[in-house]
Image (cartoon, coloured by chain):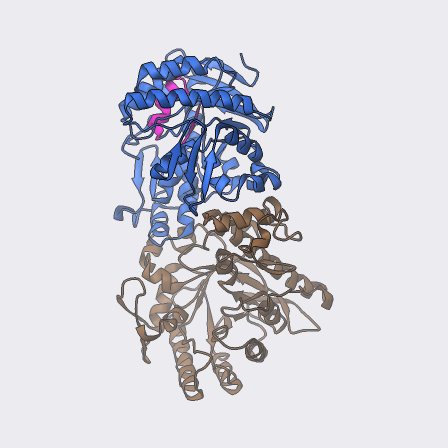
Chain colours: A brown, B blue
C-alpha cells in the first residue's frame, strides 16, 4: 500500500472505501469533496468559514491562476496556500479542462495545447512540462497532469488518438517532476468506450502516480453513461491509490461515485447554484427566488446546522436574492457547501458503520443541476 | 438626566463626551458609529462578523425596506432584528433622505412626501404618521422622524419654510407614537444658516424626544461648513440626550464631530469605498487596484488586527479586486468597518483617559471620499 494513502475500511455491500490521504499540508479523510477555488478563492466564502464547515481540501484552477495573477507572482507571494490564506491541502488541476473548453481559441499538437486567454486574447502554450512547473510554482499538494478532456460526443477514432496522447503526456509529466512533496495524479480518458478506458488504465496504472483521476465525465454525457463509465473505470484502477472523479457532481452523482469506489470529487455546482438561488436541502432542491418563499419564516432546511439555517428565514434569503445583495451569494454558498460537506460525512459514516440504510438519501437532486 | 442616556464623562479639552445609551436591544457605548444596512443587510458582511468587530448598533433604511420586502412582511417575520439576524440595537431612518434624493420623482406638501419607487415607479406617500407606523412595524430600537433633508445650496426662504414644516412634522410624529420601548429622535434642519439652526433647536428641544439628530449635512457642503454648522448646532442641543450627526462621514469628519459633542454617526462611506477598492489604514487611504500593490506581500495595514489584515496580502486583495471576486467586497468591507470601529474605540479612549494626544490621528482621509 502506498505510504500517502491508506484504505481504512472497505464497504462490504458496495465498492466504497474509507481512506486517509496524507499530503504536505495535512491529512484528508476520504471520500472527500473539494470546493472549487477558481481564481484563488472559493467564491463568496472566507477561508475561515470553509474550515468551520469541515472542508478538508480545496481545488485551485491552474488555467485561471496562470493568466491572473500569474503563477510566478503566486510563488513570489509564498505559494497558493499563503496567497489565499488556506493552510490545508490544495489540489490544482492541469488547466486542460479550461483550455479544451475554449473551443476555437485553442490548437492541440503533440507538444501541448496552444490557446488564447479569455481575458485579453494573449497567446499561451501549455505543455505537460510547463503544467508541472506551474503547479510547482503554485505549491499545491496534489498536481494533475495535462490531459485532453474529450467531449462526450467525440468519435471513437478521435478518442483513441487523444487518449494515446494523454498517456504520452502523462509520461512526460512524471519526467518533469521536481517537487518531492507534491503528489501527482494521472488522468484516465477514453470517452464513453469501455475498451479505450481499459486500455488507458492499463497504460497509466504502470506509471508511478500517487493517485488516478477519471476525466472526461460530467461533460455532457447522460447520467446513465456517467454512472456506467465511472463505475466501470473505478473498478479497473489500482486499489491502493486514491481515485478521483473529476468535475462530478450533483449530490446523487457523488453518492453513486462513492459507492463505485471513488475517493475524491470536485464540482462548481454547489457554489454556482448558490449564486443562482438554487439551494440543496435534505428534502430536495429549492429555488429561493420563487414567490412561495416570500413570507416563509422557516429556515432553508430544518435539518441543517449551518450558520445560514441557524439564523435566517427563507423569506430573508429570498429578499436578499431579489435585492441583488452580496450577502445572498455569501449565505447561499455557505449553505450549499455545508450541505456537500455533510453529504460526505454521511457517506463516510455509512462506510464506517457498514450499514446500507445509513447512505444519504438524496431527494430530487438528480434533476438537471 | 434622561433614563435611557447617561453621560459618563465629559472631556475637558473638547466638547466630547463618553456616554451610554440604553435601548430595547441593549446598551450602546457612545460615541458610536452605525454601519448602514440599507436593504436589511450591511452589504457583504455577515452579522456574526459585525459582532466580532465590536459593532454595537446598525442603521436600517426605512425607504428601502418599505419598498422591498415591505414593512408589513418584516413585521410578520418577527421584526427587522429577527429578519436580518441581528439582536443588537437598530436605528431606522425616516426615509426622508432617500425620498428627497429622488428629485423630480417626489412632491412635497404639508401632509407629507409623495414619491415614486425607484424600483417599479409605484406611487407612495410618506407622512410623519406613516413613517412612525412603518418604523414600529420594523421594530427598530430608535426611530427617526420624517424631515426634509435640504440641499446645501438651498436659498434661505426655502430653508426657513422647510425647517418650519420639519418641526410641524416632528410634533405630528410624537403624537403618532405607539411603541413605548422604541426611542424617537427629532431632527434639526436649518441648512447652513446659524440662526435657522438655532430656531429649529429651540423649537425641537421643547419636544419630548429621546435624542436629537442634525440633518442636512454631508449633502454637498464644504468641509469647513460641515464642521462649522455641525459644531454650532451640537453646542445648542440638550446635553442630557444623545446627539446624532446624520450621514457623517469620513474618519476625520467623525473625529471632528465627536470633539464637537456628537455621540452617534452613520455613513455608507466605509462599505461603499470598500467595494470600490478604497481602503482605510492608519497611514492613510489607499486604492487597492493600483499596480504598485500587485506584488506587495504586506497586509493592508500593519497596525490593523482585522481578519483581512491578519490573513491576506495587498497582492491578494488586489488580485481579488481585479478579478471581480465577491470575496474582494467581503474582505474590503470587513477591513473598512473594523477600521471605523477602532476609530470609535480610540475616540472613546481619548475621552476616557482625558489625554489630548490620545485622539486618533487620521492620515490623508480628509481627501474627498
**Residue at the image position 42 percent from the left and 51 percent from the top:** B326
Q: Position of residue A282 (x, y in %)?
A: 64, 59
Residue nearer the viewer, A279 or B360: A279
Q: Position of residue A85 (x, y in %)?
A: 44, 50
Give the side of residue B153 with respect to residue B257, left or right. Answer: left
**Residue at the image position 47 percent from the left and 19 percent from the top:** B242
Q: Where is residue B363 in the image (x, y as percent from the top left)?
A: 30, 30
Q: Is residue B38 visible?
A: no
Residue nearer the viewer, A364 or B32: A364
Magenta span has B265?
A: yes
Residue A126, placed above or below residue B148 = below
Magenta span has A324?
A: no
Q: Quadrant of residue A353?
A: bottom right
Residue nearer the viewer, B195 or A349: B195
Residue nearer the viewer, B131 or B186: B131
**Residue at the image position 27 percent from the left and 62 percent from the top:** A120
Residue A164, placed above or below residue A9 = below
Which span is picked out in magenta? B250-267
Amino acid at each position: 500500500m502506498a505510504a500517502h494513502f491508506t484504505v481504512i475500511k472497505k464497504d462490504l455491500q458496495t465498492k466504497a472505501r474509507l481512506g486517509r490521504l496524507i499530503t504536505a499540508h495535512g491529512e484528508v479523510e476520504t471520500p472527500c469533496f473539494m470546493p472549487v477555488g477558481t481564481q484563488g478563492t472559493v467564491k463568496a466564502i472566507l477561508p475561515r468559514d470553509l474550515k468551520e464547515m469541515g472542508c478538508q481540501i480545496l481545488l485551485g484552477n491552474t488555467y485561471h491562476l496562470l493568466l491572473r495573477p500569474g503563477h510566478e507572482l503566486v510563488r513570489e507571494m509564498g505559494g497558493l496556500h499563503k496567497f489565499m490564506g488556506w493552510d490545508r491541502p490544495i489540489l490544482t488541476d492541469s488547466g486542460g479542462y479550461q483550455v479544451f473548453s475554449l473551443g476555437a481559441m485553442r490548437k492541440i499538437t503533440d507538444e501541448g495545447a496552444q490557446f488564447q486567454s479569455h481575458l485579453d486574447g494573449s497567446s499561451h502554450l501549455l505543455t505537460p512540462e510547463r503544467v508541472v512547473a506551474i503547479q510547482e510554482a503554485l505549491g499545491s499538494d496534489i498536481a494533475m497532469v495535462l490531459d485532453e478532456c474529450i467531449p462526450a460526443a467525440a468519435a471513437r477514432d478521435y478518442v483513441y488518438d487523444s487518449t494515446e496522447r494523454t498517456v504520452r503526456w502523462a509520461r512526460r509529466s512524471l519526467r518533469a517532476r521536481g517537487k518531492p512533496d507534491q503528489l501527482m495524479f494521472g488522468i484516465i480518458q477514453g470517452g464513453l468506450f469501455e475498451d479505450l478506458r481499459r486500455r488507458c488504465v492499463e497504460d497509466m496504472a504502470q506509471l508511478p502516480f500517487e493517485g488516478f483521476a477519471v476525466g472526461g465525465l460530467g461533460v455532457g454525457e447522460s447520467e446513465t453513461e456517467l454512472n456506467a463509465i465511472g463505475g466501470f473505470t473505478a473498478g479497473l484502477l489500482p486499489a491502493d491509490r486514491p481515485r478521483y472523479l473529476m468535475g462530478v457532481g450533483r449530490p446523487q452523482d457523488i453518492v453513486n461515485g462513492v459507492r463505485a469506489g471513488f475517493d475524491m470529487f470536485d464540482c462548481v455546482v454547489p457554489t454556482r447554484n448558490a449564486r443562482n438561488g438554487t439551494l440543496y436541502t435534505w428534502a430536495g432542491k429549492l429555488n429561493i427566488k420563487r414567490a412561495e418563499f416570500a413570507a416563509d419564516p422557516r429556515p432553508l432546511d430544518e435539518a441543517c446546522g449551518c450558520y445560514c439555517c441557524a439564523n435566517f428565514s427563507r423569506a430573508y434569503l429570498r429578499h436578499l436574492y431579489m435585492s441583488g445583495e452580496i450577502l445572498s451569494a455569501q449565505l447561499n454558498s455557505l449553505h450549499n457547501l455545508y450541505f456537500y460537506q455533510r453529504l460526505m460525512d454521511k457517506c463516510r459514516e455509512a462506510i464506517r458503520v457498514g450499514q446500507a440504510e445509513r447512505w444519504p438519501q438524496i431527494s430530487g437532486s438528480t434533476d438537471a443541476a
